[in-house]
Amino acid sequence: MSYARVLCVGLVGVAGHLVEVEADLAPGLPVVTLTGLPDTALNEARDRVRAAVVNSGETWPNRRITINLLPAALPKQGTSFDVAIAAALLSGAGELPSVSLDGVVVLGELGLDGAVRPVRGVLPMVAAAVRAGVTQVIVPAANAWEATVVPGVTVRAIDSLRRLVDYVRGTGPLLDPPPSSASPPPPGLDLADVAGQELGRYGLEVAAAGGHHLALFGAPGAGKTMLAERLPSILPELDDATALEVTAIQSIAGVLPPDGRLVRRPPFQAPHHSASMAALIGGGSGLARPGALSLAHRGVLFLDEVAEMRGSTLQALRQPLEDGRVVIGRARGTTEFPARVQLVVAANPCPCASPAGDHACTCPPVVRRRYRAKLSGPLLDRIDIRITLHPLNAAQLMAATAPAEPSAQVASRVARARKAANTRWREHGWQVNADVPGPVLRRPPWSLPATDTADLRAALDRGLLSARGFDRVLRLAWTIADLDGRDRPGREEITEAIQLRMGESHEYAA
């Protein structure tokens, strides 16, 4: 037989597609042709596979070899096709019985010595195989635990091409996934470490309960970064479906923990203020890779020193914050990544950032305006909560009182509020108040009495709020009501929401 095929999986973004690796061996000048839109790394598989086959003790067929990857119109990238190519080639040459690999997905990268190396994206690949009806996969030993996270599939592992060849010939076994060595994740940062800043702590709690974006302004050392870094500690753990999403993205990016366990803690990404647009949004040559925005999916994206970032990079956040996804177009195709995050930004009032406050600032007015303009009005309008943190005095910092409320207590209130919101919106498919479209909250049965919304409507008429800001205040009011254990917000909750939205007349919030 001069033809054989083996199943593999290709990734475009986080979406996996079943790929048939075909091998045809014909008389003619010995050459290997690879077709089906391979990228550079995949084109180089010809040399890796040849060396791996020979160094595994097999004979390289000196014939005209054509390797085709179906569907041919789907761009293919990466090194995960190496083992499937080697298996299809040896089966086509008559060295292996192909029936043993019928309906089995084979993944892995080959070293020149025949060793099978781990690859990125095994979890979404295996999930795609299961959706396509595949019930058995063979993966690199280092990726075995990651693959077992996906239900409904039998996972076997290989550490070398030799082991796969012996299995197909019936002379040796495959490896079982190793026993779990997952240990509990280390404890995170705790809100008990934050001295004072009651307003900042409350804003953080409201943001966590409703999934709202948050902006923290103030002088250096006021506690902006400390608060932001502790937001994940009061967020609920991810459920199974969401944990699979987050784990799949981290698998593609190659940052998954080696034990392969599901990521249950909401991710936290804090890119440096010099990060490029590709690093923040996603990008790269060929098909795009996920950026910090997608790596923070279902978690927190923290932009510290946001006024130091490039304006064009920040503006690229506007559409993903509304849509909850990133769509990146390249010549080889379009890639989509999920990006439903809680954005937290922190900024100083000016470049000199004097700890003594504005009265000690040495910056000219034009410099202050240029500095504040980095956080543009359209982007700031998408941030629900804006809080100005004032520097602590010595009495607040050194007070020998009881420690501040820990994250565990705040997390319990956040969990109750989220449960109330989820019960209310579950039939519509929304999880938190920040997900609810504005028109829904302005129409019965969720619209609020005119007497309760009088101040809010007045702020809109006076131009202090945009229509988007109007809706975001309503969402904030519902979250505050959930934290207070109320069925619906009233005038008091709306007033509090306006204050959280408008800030303390800070120049950033103007």
Image (spheres, rainbow, N blue to C red):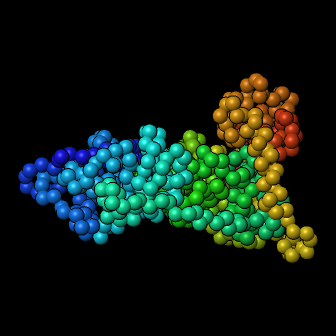
Given residues 212 and 451, the one toward you in this image is: 212
Q: Going by the picture, which residue comes out furthest to the top?
A: 444
Above or below for 54 versus 465: below
| Residue 199 visible in the snapshot | no
Residue 462's spot in the image, x, y percent?
74, 36
Whether residue 8 sits left or right of residue 470 in the image: it is: left
Quarter of the image where one finds residue 31:
bottom left
- Please report the residue visible at 65 percent of the width from the left and 70 percent of the height from the top: 352
Given residues 93 and 71, the one toward you in this image is: 93
Given residues 426 and 56, the one toward you in this image is: 56
Q: Going by the picture, which residue comes out furthest to the right?
A: 401
Residue 208's spot in the image, x, y percent?
73, 51
Whether residue 475 sits left or right of residue 3 in the image: it is: right
- Please report the residue visible at 28 percent of the width from the left and 48 percent of the height from the top: 98
- Please report the residue visible at 87 percent of the width from the left and 68 percent of the height from the top: 403
Residue 194's spot in the image, x, y percent?
79, 67
Given residues 428 and 3, the one toward you in this image is: 3
- Please report the residue visible at 44 percent of the width from the left and 61 percent of the height from the top: 175
Whether residue 482 sits left or right of residue 169 in the image: it is: right
